[in-house]
Amino acid sequence: MRLISACLAATLLAGAGAADAADVTASVRKPEVNVYAAPIPGSGMLKTLKQDDTVGIASQQGLWYEVKLPGGQAGFLRINDVRLNYGSSEDGSANVRVLTSGKTGAGRVSETAGVRGIDESELRAAAFDQAQFDAMVANRADTGSAAAYAGERGWQATAVAWDEEARPTRSDENASQPSSPATGTLQGLAGMLGSFGQKAGAMLGATIRVAPKSGAEQAAEELALGPQIAGRVLGARPLWSNAEAQRRVSVVGRWVASQTSRPDLPWTFGVIDTSEVNAFAAPGGYVLMTRGLYELLSSDAELAAVLGHEISHAVERDHYHVLRKQELASVGKDMVSSEVNLGTGIAQTYAKRYVEQHGAAILATSLDRQAEFRADQAAEIYLARAGMNPMALYAVLQKMTALGRESASLAALYKTHPPLDARMDRIDERGYSTLEPYLGRP
């Protein structure tokens, strides 16, 4: 796979003609937007564009787009004043180079033609890779190093309320609490009835599995499932051998996670070596993103936006809830086959059994659209709390749009997420409301 460095991409862009620069086009979706002389609010208005006007994007500078006006004059628009048009070719990276060149912290832009992403069958079949998992854990950042990284960049933690956020429970801090009394009683009965026959034990085992689980039991299962699932993703694709990228993802991710309602999860982050554009969140605070997505991002804020979306899935237990539904749906089958865990109630046993049957395939399962929209909103909240600009998420979604509907690198993401334009529509409809004070941040 051919890689083009940020510096080389900038050189190519500088030598490109106007037609090449216009490959990235955008349409005005608002009644009207103003074009400014510099990427600074109030820098002097050059032109007003009307709804449905089309402009060519020359580059991205922070959270502004440089556009070419008639006569060759350059002007600047906020990244959410226009909507990038979908790239028209499979090799959408040719468009995205315009949006990633010459920026501090930018990665590299990969060619996307011929990309083969991680599909569900691979996630189901991949074996747990202990060495890779240990390496991911070894990169784990603590709160002190994350805070130091934030301080060097002038990020200040900010209190931003959000009523929809999952509330922390004491079980998040101590997942070793005993199970609920009802479950404990059922476990004892299952053990005793097992001696009277497999059928009786199986029926009690099934009852245990449909019984409500305490917060402590859920937390214990999350913490057991997370490593098992993450280790199998690493079995499908190893960590990228870029120590700087691994450290950066770990400290930025840890800083963002510290701003959530579940800061005490064993937050662990990594970049896997595949050029597809995607990210995954396993239960219990294990987040992996692909090299292709990492290379697409131009700043720490854009990186934090991607990680914030995935962090929200872990905070809200989104994938865990899908697993729980699958567990409940399988009770009838287990009673028929008598293949029931006879009431051990041990989280590690459940986790082992689940991954033996399904591997890491849960991460290829589409979540409810509302869960994805909520994760986008959460990412914006987390960005504001972490001292960054909430609009960075919009910039990421715009870059993905420029890659195009036919981009092979986005095939897996399109299968599990709402369309990119639908996600941006939801952000536009929701607006920024209480986040307005933070939109002036760099």
Image: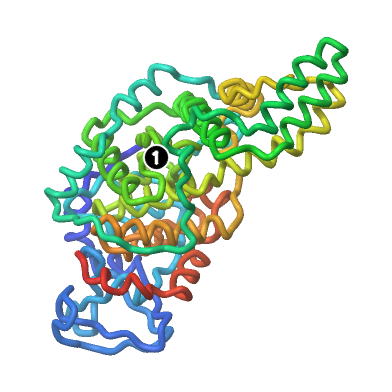
Residue 301 visible in the current orientation: yes
Nearest the eye: 300 or 97: 300
Question: At 49% from the left edge and 38% from the top edge, which residue is drawn?
Answer: 117
Image quadrant in which you'd find residue 133: top left
- Quarter of the rendering occupied by the N terminus: top left
Nearest the eye: 363 or 324: 324
Question: At 50% from the left edge and 37% from the top edge, which residue is drawn?
Answer: 283
Q: Is residue 234 above or below residue 23?
A: above
- Residue at label 1? 290
Instruction: Indicate left or right for 182 with 51 as reference.
Output: right
Image quadrant in which you'd find residue 40: bottom left
Mark 1: few/some/many CA within 10 Å (<14, 14-19, 20+): many
Question: At 74% from the left edge and 36% from the top edge, which residue is drawn?
Answer: 210
Q: Outermost residue toward the left?
A: 152
* Residue 189 image position (x, y, % from top left): 77, 21
Instruction: Indicate left or right for 95 with 227 as reference.
Output: left
Instruction: Indicate left or right for 136 with 300 as reference.
Output: right
**Residue type for callout 1:** Thr
* Residue 200 image position (x, y, % from top left): 86, 20
Residue 116 visible in the current orientation: no
Per the image, label 1 sits on a secondary structure element best described as strand
* Residue 262 image position (x, y, % from top left): 41, 45
- Quarter of the rendering occupied by the C terminus: bottom left
Q: How many marks?
A: 1
Nearest the eye: 351 or 77: 351
Instruction: Indicate left or right for 1 with 386 as reference.
Output: right
